[in-house]
Image: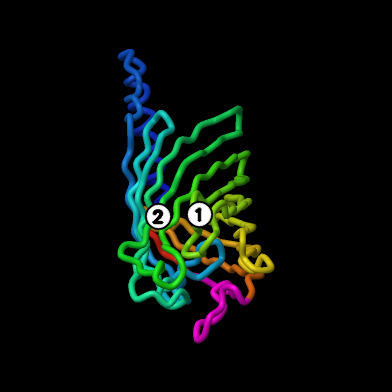
Amino acid sequence: MNLFKSLASSALALGLLANTAAHGQSAAPAPDFTLAYNIGGTTDYRFRGISQSSFKPAVQGGIDFSHKSGAYAGVWASNVNWIKDYIGATDGALEVDFFGGYKGELAKDLGFDVGVIAYVYPSNTAAARSADANTNEIYAALTYGPVTAKYSRSLGNLFANPNSAISQYLEVAASFDVGNGFSITPHLGRQTIPNQTASAGDYTDYALTVNKDLGNGLSASLTLLGTDAKEFYKVAPIDNLGKSGLLVGLKYSF
């Protein structure tokens, strides 16, 4: 940012504040709600460490509604490959997520977030091979300072896995501002899927992401991640969907 313009803008803002105070006026009230939009792409769409796009690029976007009460809702979409490549279904190349919840503060620096999310794969035919890919989850999270712990639980089968109701995912992540528009986000998660032979679907994932705010709503990310997922997430000729990887992402928010 140009220093002169920054100082000029600050001086103008101070002048407006002084003028407002002199006339006994208060600042404009915060809006009752906001709508935000985002669109972006990634070299590999990973969810809980597992590739959803078979290590291919994905285009993604969403809309977020937030009310000043703490209520929120939104929709998000991405192309996917795993339903065809991993399950062997004939249809199911799109993921559309619908979510809603409520967030607030329990005490100073201690926030909470509870909600429900529906992962919908329109026209997917995964049920012909295993189980329907559509999945519903409830979640609850606590945030203290830069650290967030979140628990998610499926209400039915999890992502085309038969007899997998009450699957659970526990994760801990943090976000650290390191200056100059950069932030670092470490992440650790544990997925458990019941009724699978020898707990074959259970695994741990871990990631480290470097984010860069490029200004004007544009941001970039670089993520190094991995899992200890085994044969359960591997099917010929697709490699293990949980193998280690390096992802590059770009997003525009407006």
User: Which region is colored magenta?
Assistant: 231-247
Q: Tell me the amino acid under the disc marked 2.
A: Gly
Callout 2: few (<14), some (14-19), or many (20+) C-alpha neighbours within 10 Å?
few
The residue pinned by badge 2 equals 215
- In which quarter of the view is residue 165 placed? bottom right
What type of secondary structure mainly makes up the magenta span?
Answer: loop
Residue at point 59%, 56% (across, down): 185
Q: 159 or 77, which is in the foreground?
A: 159
In the rendered image, the vertical position of residue 182 relative to residue 28, given as above or below: below
Percent x, y of residue 62: 34, 54
Q: Residue at x 35, y 67 (%)?
A: 124
Residue, far right: 198
Q: Secondary structure at mark 2?
A: strand
Question: In this figure, what is the number of numbered marks?
Answer: 2
Instruction: Tell me, yes or no, whether the two marked residues, 1 and 2, touch with CB atoms within 8 Å.
Output: yes
Q: Is residue 228 above or below residue 137?
A: below
Please check the rendered image and state whether residue 245 is part of the magenta-colored stretch, yes or no.
Answer: yes
Left or right: 10 with respect to 104?
A: left
Q: Which residue is mark 1?
A: 181
Q: Residue at x 55, y 59 (%)?
A: 164
Q: How is the image coloured?
A: rainbow
User: Looking at the rendered structure, which numbered label has been put on residue 116?
Assistant: none
Relative side of 122 to 152, left or right = left
Residue sitting farthest toward the top = 24
- In primary-sequence order, the first of circles 1 and 2 is 1
Q: Is residue 166 magenta?
A: no
Q: Nearer the viewer, residue 59 or 218?
A: 59
**Which secondary structure lies at badge 1?**
loop
Residue in the foreground of this view, choosing between 189 and 143: 189
Residue 142, relative to residue 77: is it above or below?
above
Residue 51, horizontal then vertical, whole percent: 50, 70
Amino acid type at circle 1 is Gly
